[in-house]
Amino acid sequence: MSLEPYQRKFIEWAIEQKALTFGTYTLKSGRVSPYFYDAAKFNKGSAFVTVGQFYADVLQNVELNYEVVFGSAYKGIPIALSTVNALMEKCNIDVAYSFNRKEKKIHGEGGNIVGAPLKGNVLIVDDVISVGTAIRECLKIVKENGANPVGIVIALDRQEKGTGEITVVQQIEQEYNLPVKTIINLDNIVQYITECGGYEEHLIMIEKYQNIYGVKK
């Protein structure tokens, strides 16, 4: 399957920004990965604006009804802000944003939700799904506040298997009956760096990693 133009641009840009790198990385899960995606590298004004454009590209191609875009602390916060900005600029869609605090505030306005109240239909945005712990916590927060999660958009699906022989993303879709949309997945990265050339050693390591943690094709 050929890459969509926005997918090719995103991978190229993420590599340029050093947000997508190749080497040896120990993940939160304890797995040692041959590649790493770090949305915290999008730490300049220009990058903040650009990353939301890619999330908007995905949302232009799906039919979802939502009033609020939610990003969890901490990396999800700039993603949510950038996404609502891009939706307004690119699509003339004006939606609210919301994010959570790690600790509940006991003075001032109080609570642990900042921005728009979590109510009605909510779209969750995040950077990556590996084993699914963070996104499940997002879903819990949204539901505990009485809102209705209608979908999830992430930058990268690592396509790692869950408890069975389906990926974590597929497992979350089935478990919560929600669509999970991605800008790119690991197959897209492999296709891109294969076409570019010069990544042969990294491709071997990625294949070995997927043989252990990926779903059999």
Image (spheres, rainbow, N blue to C red):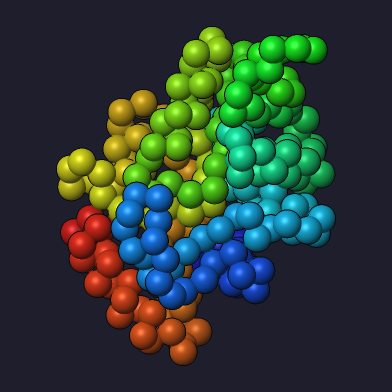
Residue 200 at x, y percent in the picture:
38, 86
Left or right of 135? Residue 163 is: left
Q: Residue at x 54, y 52 (%)?
A: 155
Specify the quadrant that holds the C terminus: bottom left
Residue 80 at x, y percent in the picture:
67, 38
Image quadrant where residue 23 sits: bottom left
Q: Is residue 17 above or below residue 183?
A: below
Specify the quadrant that holds the N terminus: bottom left
Of 57 and 111, which appears nearest the observer?
111
Residue 101 at x, y percent in the picture:
63, 27
Q: Residue furthest front?
A: 106
Of 214 and 57, which appears nearest the observer?
214
The answer to whether residue 68 is seen in the rendering is no
Q: Residue furthest bottom?
A: 198
Q: Residue at x 35, y 35 (%)?
A: 172
Residue 91 at x, y percent in the picture:
75, 41
Q: Is residue 215 above or below residue 9?
A: above
Image quadrant where residue 212 sits: bottom left
Q: Is residue 142 above or below residue 22?
A: above
The answer to whether residue 115 is seen in the rendering is yes
Q: Is residue 34 above or below residue 99?
A: below
Image quadrant where residue 116 sits: top right
Q: Residue at x 31, y 58 (%)?
A: 31
